[in-house]
Image (cartoon, grey):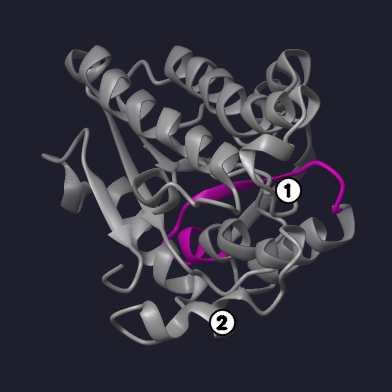
Amino acid sequence: MNSIVLVTGSSRGIGAATAKHLASLGYAVCVNYIKSGIEANKVVTEIVNNGGKAIAVQADVANEDDVIGLFKSIDTGLGQITHLVNNAGILLPQARVSEMSAERINKVLTTNVTSYFLCCREAIKRMVNGGAIVNVSSAASRLGSPSEYVDYAASKGAIDTLTRGLSLEVASDNIRVNCVRPGFIETNMHADGGEPGRIERVKSIIPLQRGGKPEEVAAAIAFLLSNEAAYITGTFIDLAGGK
């Protein structure tokens, strides 16, 4: 059976690295984006030029109608999905909880949590012969991100719980659900939080004394999706340099 994977939020960063890596392993890839169509199509072009198969589909995965349309596009353009990487997420400017509005909190939770539930729902419906899901959480779910992103950390804590609960719920259907928890990875997300140079500031407190590469996270995701991890479900891989 052909391996068909959706990587949400894959126009940049960890998502783009994952889409390219999985394509190099023979997966047909749906590159999902919400606004960055130019970047998403660059990822697709690179995959195709290297002999792979990929399509780019615009969808806000926090929106139920968009998610339904996204999966219909995959059905038509690639076939029945076998693998899912939930990666889409947002990080808003650093703030203390005492400064956070309900609008901000709800935006983070809807984008970072509701989207994962919706995509899991649609993927599971199609994984009638089994499949694998990897959720991208964050070391923030363990560390809490005080005075910076407690809302983001809380959203990733929810993803940890989703991973554990869903893995038990669908195990008998031969669907595996696992999770990676990246820490200080060199992506543009730090700029979204208002501090592009954050890794340089904190690297001295990281045991490995450096930030991680998106490609290192992609390799861990690929392992958890693969048949080499066929007896692994409900498991977490931390990629935070020992932090």
34 versus 60 height, above or below: below
The answer to whether one can see residue 218 in this image is yes
Tell me the quarter of the image containing the N terminus.
Answer: top left
Q: Position of residue 11 (x, y in %)?
A: 72, 57
What residue is shown with label 1? 92
Tell me the element at label 1: loop
Q: Residue at x 31, y 67 (%)?
A: 243
Tell me the element at label 2: helix
Front residue of 1/83: it is: 83
What residue is shown with label 2? 201
Mark 1 / mark 2, whichever is N-terminal: 1
Left or right, 93 with reference to 38:
left
31 versus 212 height, above or below: above
Q: Nearer the viewer, mark 1 or mark 2?
A: 2
Q: Residue at x 59, y 56 (%)?
A: 15
Q: Residue at x 26, y 71 (%)?
A: 242
